[in-house]
Image (spheres, coloured by chain):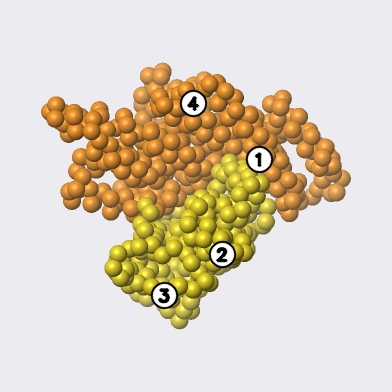
Amino acid sequence: MEHWSPTSIAAVPDTGPAPPSIALRLVRDPKVVFAGGFILLLIVLAVFAPWIAPQDPLAQNLLTATSPPVGFPDAEPGFLLGTDGLGRDVLSRVIFGARISLTVAFVAAGLACLIGSLLGLLAGFLGGWVEVVISRLVDIWMAFPPVLLSILLVAVLGTGLHSVIAAIVVIDWTRFCRVVRTETMGQAQMDYVVAARTIGFSRPAILFREILPNVMPVLIALLTLEMGIAVVVEAILSFVGLSVSSDTPTWGGMIAEGRQIVHEGWWVLAAPLTALFATVVAFNQLGDGLARSLDPVLRR
Amino acid sequence: MLLAVVANRLAMALLTLAGVAVVVFILLRVVPGDPVAMMISPGAGPADIAALKAHYGLDAPLATQFWIWIKGIVTGDFGTSITLHLPVTEVLASRLPATLELAILALIVAVLFGGAVAVAGTLMRRTIGETIIDGLNSILLAVPDFIWALALVLLFAVAIPVLPLTGRIDPELAEGFSTRFYLAESVLTGRFSVAADILSHMIMPTLALALPLAAVIVRLLKQSLKEAMLQDYVLLARIKGFRELRLVLQEALRNAVGPTLALTGVQFTFLIGGTVIVERIFSYPGIGNLAIDAVINRDFPLIQGLVLLFGLIFILINIGVDLSVAALNPRLRHA
């Protein structure tokens, strides 16, 4: 443990002799390794999609339309996962679709986290009327069915990626706000906060240098879970036709097309659905693993 | 005392509903799309548009529109749907039963299935069986109704085509009903072949809505049951020689069910929210499917009515949960 310094006196929980470093704990957790690995792979696929995808995701060819994946009778060589109703390569479209999904996951979840946790920190730390106002706001917000609210918001804001991201942020900041508020209230009672007050730290210093680092493990786990939720919301909005324009490949858009021609070509639905399923499960498992590894006291 | 709690909750509920009404009204007035532009035929001139706007009250100032709307709500008049040309109350009344039957059936399936798996997991605690249940459940907890619905489409409509893919009832059988509660009415009047047809339409949407809730129930109820099994009264019953299954069902379950009940209530509101997309996937004629059409067509009066209806359902469920938790817990009954 470091030498005592007046810049930070946050409590370091006593976990016995030489606790393993955070990095080591993360590498040892199979959930973090496998789920994190999958997300990393997905990021690589999305970033380098033009070089990795075997075909142009927009190239149509009605002569090879709805041909099944390789290994099934009548499969077209060169189209590993088959083609859709317009003869476009399903695999390439799934790879390009990851771009939209991951953009929404990181940007929307990140912004929701930023706004929600800031309000949560303030409500939990300041108390009084600030807490009352923010808590009432969260209550009213949560009286709306989320799916309905997101569709309503996108209808108000117009379709497109910006609207989808805005809708997710506007709806899901409450998830962060509630948890961070409770967590902050708990931390604010701790001895190290009282000590910091006694020494004469300013309120912002206590909030951001003392309390925030201790709320961080919960926040990171919550953020990862939220990314999974954001991916599904984007897919639902694309499915309904309220997300990005139809010439950009998205998993939700592909699912909607696949649902229409499910009897002629099940793979058009199965491929993007599998990608969506794997991504959502990966974000969830990663969140679980992070919550376990980052939380020194294993509060749950 | 219970009465005072109910009165207090109802007052809060009305306040929340009023807040929802104001928010929805304001949100919809800033929508860029013009509802009238979507319903006119290509040959219509400016005079026709103005006449249409006047007909639906869309030319009045905002404050007047809001006042008319609030006055209407209080008297049970939600206005006229712009796309369906019918009173909103009538449209909602004709669509709500389908959604209620679906949501309640899904709730029953989720509680029975989730409860059964939780009890099985408790009986198998500290064995490979529990590890398998926990492992599967941790994955299933992540899967939302949207993915379930489409996976079921692939399974039961394509791989093993045994179930109808869309709708609520075979149109030829949808005759001679005096209510819109088709399933309940056909069961009560003994028309079991009709009920079977309705159920075959409902299996996939019901499972899609029930499975995410069942996963949540399994996790919480199993944990509560395992804690209860360590209590003295269970030990006492075990010494008396009761069987393990009876210990779980008769001794532990009664004491462990409280937290699960409260959580199930909250989750039921998510299930109702989920009907929006699940009904869409299966073209099921409920209020969820209607909501998406209303938003796409910018049907203001219908959207306002639908959002208030959803808000009302949410609030009623929350009050119901509070009351049943209070009724089941003797310590809270006098609080």
Is residue A250 rendered to the left or right of residue A170? left
Chain shown yellow: that is: A
Between disc 2 and disc 1, the foreground one is 2
Mark identifier at residue B314: none
- Asked if badge 1 and badge 4 are on a common chain, one would say yes
In three-dimensional space, the C-alpha distance between marks 3 and 1, rounded to whole angstroms, equals 52 Å
Q: Which residue lies under the disc numbered 3?
A: A2
SS of the residue under disc 2: helix
> N-terminal of the two: label 1 or label 4?
1
At numbered mark 3, what does the secondary structure look like: helix, strand or loop?
loop
- Of all chains in the rendering, the one displayed in orange is B
User: How far apart, in angstroms, are the residues tagged by discs 2 and 4?
Assistant: 43 Å
Q: Quadrant of the N terminus of chain A?
A: bottom left
* Tag 3 and tag 1, C-beta contact below 8 Å: no
The residue where tag 4 is placed is B335
Is label 2 or label 4 in front?
A: 2
Q: Residues within 10 Å of mark 1 (few under 14, many from 20)?
A: many
Pointer 1 residue = B20
Residue under mark 1: which chain is it in?
B
CA distance for labels 3 and 2: 19 Å
What residue type is disc 1 on?
Answer: Val
- Between B311 and B263, the one lying in front of the other is B263
Where residue B113 appears, as percent x and y from the top left, is 31, 38
Query: Pointer 2: residues within 10 angstroms few (<14), some, or many (20+)?
Result: few
